[in-house]
Amino acid sequence: METFSHLEDKLASLPAQPGVYLMKDRAGTVLYVGKAISLRSRVRSYFQAGADQPIKTQVLVSKVADLDYLITATEKEALILESNLIKKHKPRYNVNLKDDKHFLYLKFTIKEDYPRLIFVRRVEKDNSLYFGPYASANAVRETIQIIHRLFPIRKCSQRIFKNRIRPCINFQLKRCLAPCCYKVDQEEYNKIVKKVLLFLRGQDRDLITQLIAEMNEESKNLNFERAALIRDEIKAIEKTLEKQKIVSTRFIDQDVISYFRKGILFEIFILFIRQGRMVGNQSFSFRKVELEDEEVISSFLTQFYGEGKYIPDEVIIPLRLENQNLIEEYFSERKGKKIKIIFPHQGDRKNLLTMAFDNAKLMLENREAQSEKINRAMKKIKESLRLQREPRIIECFDISNLFGKEAVGSMVRFEEGEPLKQKYRHYKIKTVDQADDYGMMYEVIKRRLTRGPEEQDLPDLLIVDGGKGQLQVAGQVMKELGITIDTIGLAKGKLQDFTKGPEKVFLPGRKDPLILSKHSSALHLLQRIRDEAHRFAITFHRKLRAKKQTASPLDSIPGIGPKKKKNLLIYFGSIKKIQHAEKEEISQAPSITAKDAENIYNFFHKV
């Protein structure tokens, strides 16, 4: 990467080659990442005197104090590099799509002797078949459950499949043919695989026609019980497929992308269509978009269909892009087949775009209404609790322990009324070893606030789950650190008969707690944040307890991690049997090397 001392020098030295450029402010923060066929022409166009630039571009240029660039061999390489740099630097003036780890795919391992169906988060070039994406984990699990109920394909992993001695319960339930233990005819199993593929591809007519033929054949051969099972199978498939709406007669995989914009608010909505059936949708909200519509959609495409993401046969978009052919070529290269990016003017595709647009508009309007509701709630919190400023950033602390054991603290962070999960923190209690909630709260808050000033990252409002005692602890920490933050305690109220009472809000310097109306939007927001902190703490506490309960002597042996530990226990059945096994026998367990076997033997025999 080239570096010069002055912006003017860099502009004068730009090459007429394809590449990526990074605009920075005086502090060195990357403001914008862009790509160009010619770096010289593209970048200089921003700084030409008298150029008719949009207001948004003028604002960006006024903040640029430095410039870096990278040349690439082709425009396609620049396209890929731009997407990677946006994800890395998260520039203020780019559209940055967060990593979509929540998308799931169904993977059918058709290259295995007895294929199985699993869900994964990345699409790999491993000759498996992939179906999706699914925005909901529940949708994936429901699909797998339906398939396992209808078709007796194997469910176990390769490791368990190879080491299983007797069939599992799925064989007893007639939901697996148990190829792990019995000789299953490969041709017969492949027939089941073909049915599963027909189901996943939405080819219901072909599947049902095939099943009806099988049912009639079984009935003809007087196998009435088998015929009845196939009949029930047909009914279950028909009922399942009724839920999926046919929206296209093309019977190919399509993603339909549209958007709705209101100033700097931008909502993108995607319809996922597989083999003509609507299988799901997803929306993406961007709050401060300064770019033109075309650049937003272009950047979104390259980020959304990044490495490991499924690319359908057609991507339908709401406007023509300048680099549309380039993106299409890049997607086709990755897919290994021709991919079409289409901007339709009429017909079925245009109707699908209209549907996506209507949904994008509705989603943005709903988010605006929710945002307004949160704004009113924050104003109400400021007014009711007499805070210094509106609590745009709120952090809440909670402690979870069982008689002081496996004690943990949690901190959750909400910005503009929404959870910011990348800022959530767990704390293992280090300085308190008995049931002392105040001591634990002191440790957790101090650990958080000690680094706050240095990172210039402090909340507008700090909430502690508890009453006066916890509130005083927070005040003590801030006094020691010389920090001033609005702080409250939020405690669940109880009546004299131990039934649930009104929530109590404790304020510094006030003897009696404040009782907000149970219908107050301010109280609802505070409760939501406190309950999230409690959930986060409880989840971590249970995880630590479960980990302790499953601890074994194997955890103390060098080189024996969770996977090898599990393999040993499955192979031998108990710690006692491992303890009395010889080195040669131990080395026979899956994934256990000769060195591992020696370490395990020496550990138990104190060599």
Image (cartoon, helix red, strand yellow):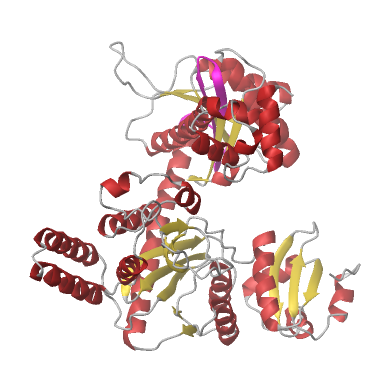
Q: Looking at the image, which is closer to me, 482 or 81?
A: 81
Residue 44 percent coordinates (x, y): 78, 81
Q: What residue appears at the point 25 percent right and 59 percent down from the top-left corner?
A: 150
Residue 66 location, quadrant: bottom right
| Picture quarter with the N terminus | bottom right
Give the extent of the magenta segment: 384-409
In percent of width and height, residue 223 lies at 11, 63
Is residue 467 left or right of 495 when viewed as pictured? right
Asked if residue 1 lies left or right of residue 599, the reply is: right
Q: Position of residue 144 (x, y in %)?
A: 34, 56
In the rendered image, residue 429, in percent from the top left (x then y), is placed at 62, 23
Which of 606 and 344 lies nearest the eye of the viewer?
606
Q: Is residue 321 above or below residue 81?
A: below
Q: Is residue 291 visible?
A: yes
In the picture, which quadrant includes the C terminus? top right
Q: Is residue 241 above or below residue 491?
A: below
Residue at 35% x, 69% y is 190
